[in-house]
């Protein structure tokens, strides 16, 4: 499996938008996300240990069908330790410019990735998201996220199937199916630079809410990161939940790779399947620089 996919999965688990990571082991790195800025440094040697440190910026943070940062800019810093490019432990701190506390929320993550053979890999992860007590009513409640995933490399297509769950005051289960196709150009500029592409389509399934009122029927997503709202039964309104397709994500990560440095831009689009959207539900065009 391509090492870029392993590191992308790691950064997704840690929810960190990294600018300059410093690596002490053989690792071909690629970071992807939504609406931020990114560059990656890689250093090769024979050590079993690796260390990534980074700082980044984004104007939003989209996660599991919810906009955690509520379309507000954020700055994040992270530190990640890796062992044999398979076991990773990370911690990150995040500041939202719209709020006074220096530390808005932090994340603690542990993940494991392993290639069974040239076409099949497995991964597992567990993360803890801890929000500042002053912002729990504004942002989200503390929660855990755990996942198990398998990857299949069909040579012309790479498929990743992930089963995950959020554990909070309102726990939810998720299924994601992501298909991508990685390729790169021949090297140029004295054989030290190349451009990589990894276009993808991601299908996310989760819990949807159906609300029926006298004005009609609407389908939406109730964020699992906050205390559940009371069900609207009676007064001409009924609310039920069901499991189905939440959204489809499209993206084309493009990376310029030169020696130890990778700079990536990722235009994308989030297409929700439900009709009732608000500031907490991501939709539309996204851009990651």
Image: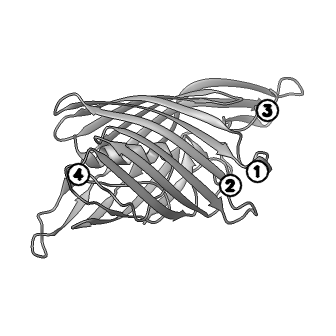
Mark identifier at residue 26: 4
Q: Secondary structure at mark 2?
A: loop
Whether the residues at callouts 1 and 3 have beta carbons within 8 Å, the answer is no
The residue where tag 3 is placed is 229
Residue in front for this viewpoint, 276 or 87: 87
Residue at the location (37% across, 34% down)?
Answer: 112
Q: Earlier in the sequence, mark 2 or mark 3?
A: 2
Residue at the location (45% across, 61% down)?
Answer: 54
Which is more foreground, mark 2 or mark 3? 2
Q: Secondary structure at mark 3?
A: loop
- Mark 3, other Cα within 10 Å: few <14 / some 14–19 / many ≥20: few
Q: Earlier in the sequence, mark 2 or mark 4?
A: 4
- Placement of 252 over or under 209, stated as above or below: below
Q: Earlier in the sequence, mark 3 or mark 4?
A: 4
- Placement of 6 over or under 254, stated as above or below: above
Mark identifier at residue 249: none
Q: CA distance from mark 2 to mark 4?
A: 33 Å
Q: Secondary structure at mark 1?
A: helix
Spot occupied by residue 27 in the image (x, y as percentages of width and height): 26, 51
Whether the residues at callouts 2 and 3 have beta carbons within 8 Å, the answer is no
Whether the residues at callouts 1 and 2 have beta carbons within 8 Å, the answer is yes
Which quadrant of the rendered structure holds the N terminus? top left
Q: Secondary structure at mark 4?
A: loop
Q: Can the viewer see residue 201 in this picture?
A: yes
Spot occupied by residue 113 in the image (x, y as percentages of width and height): 33, 35
Q: Can the viewer see residue 221 in this picture?
A: no
The residue where tag 2 is placed is 104
Q: CA distance from mark 1 to mark 3?
A: 18 Å
The residue where tag 1 is placed is 135
- Placement of 205 over or under 67, stated as above or below: above
Residue at the location (25% across, 53% down)?
Answer: 28
- Mark 2, other Cα within 10 Å: few <14 / some 14–19 / many ≥20: many
């Amino acid at each position: 499996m391509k090492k870029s996919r392993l590191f992308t999965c790691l950064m997704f688990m840690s929810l960190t938008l990294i600018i300059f990571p410093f690596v002490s082991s053989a690792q071909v790195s690629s970071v992807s996300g939504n609406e931020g800025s990114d560059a990656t440094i890689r250093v090769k040697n024979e050590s079993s240990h690796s260390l990534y440190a980074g700082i980044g910026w984004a104007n939003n943070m989209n996660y599991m069908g919810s906009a955690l940062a509520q379309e507000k800019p954020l700055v994040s810093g992270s530190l990640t330790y890796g062992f044999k490019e398979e076991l990773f432990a990370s911690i990150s701190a995040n500041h939202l410019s719209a709020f006074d506390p220096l530390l808005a929320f932090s994340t603690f993550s542990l993940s494991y990735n392993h290639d069974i053979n040239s076409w099949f890999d497995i991964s597992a992860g567990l993360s803890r998201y801890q929000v500042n007590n002053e912002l729990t009513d504004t942002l989200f409640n503390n929660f855990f996220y755990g996942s198990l995933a398998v990857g299949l490399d069909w040579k012309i297509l790479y498929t990743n199937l992930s089963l995950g769950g959020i554990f909070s005051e309102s726990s939810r289960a998720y299924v994601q199916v992501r298909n991508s196709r990685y390729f790169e150009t021949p090297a140029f500029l004295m054989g030290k630079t190349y451009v990589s592409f990894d276009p993808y389509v991601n299908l996310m399934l989760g819990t949807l809410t159906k609300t029926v009122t006298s004005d009609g029927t609407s389908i939406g997503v109730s964020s699992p990161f906050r205390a559940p709202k009371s069900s609207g039964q009676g007064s001409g309104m009924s609310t039920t939940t069901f499991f189905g397709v939440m959204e489809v994500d499209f993206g084309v990560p493009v990376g310029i790779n030169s020696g130890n440095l990778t700079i990536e831009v990722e235009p994308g689009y989030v297409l929700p399947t439900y009709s009732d959207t608000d500031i907490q539900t991501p939709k539309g065009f996204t851009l990651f620089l």
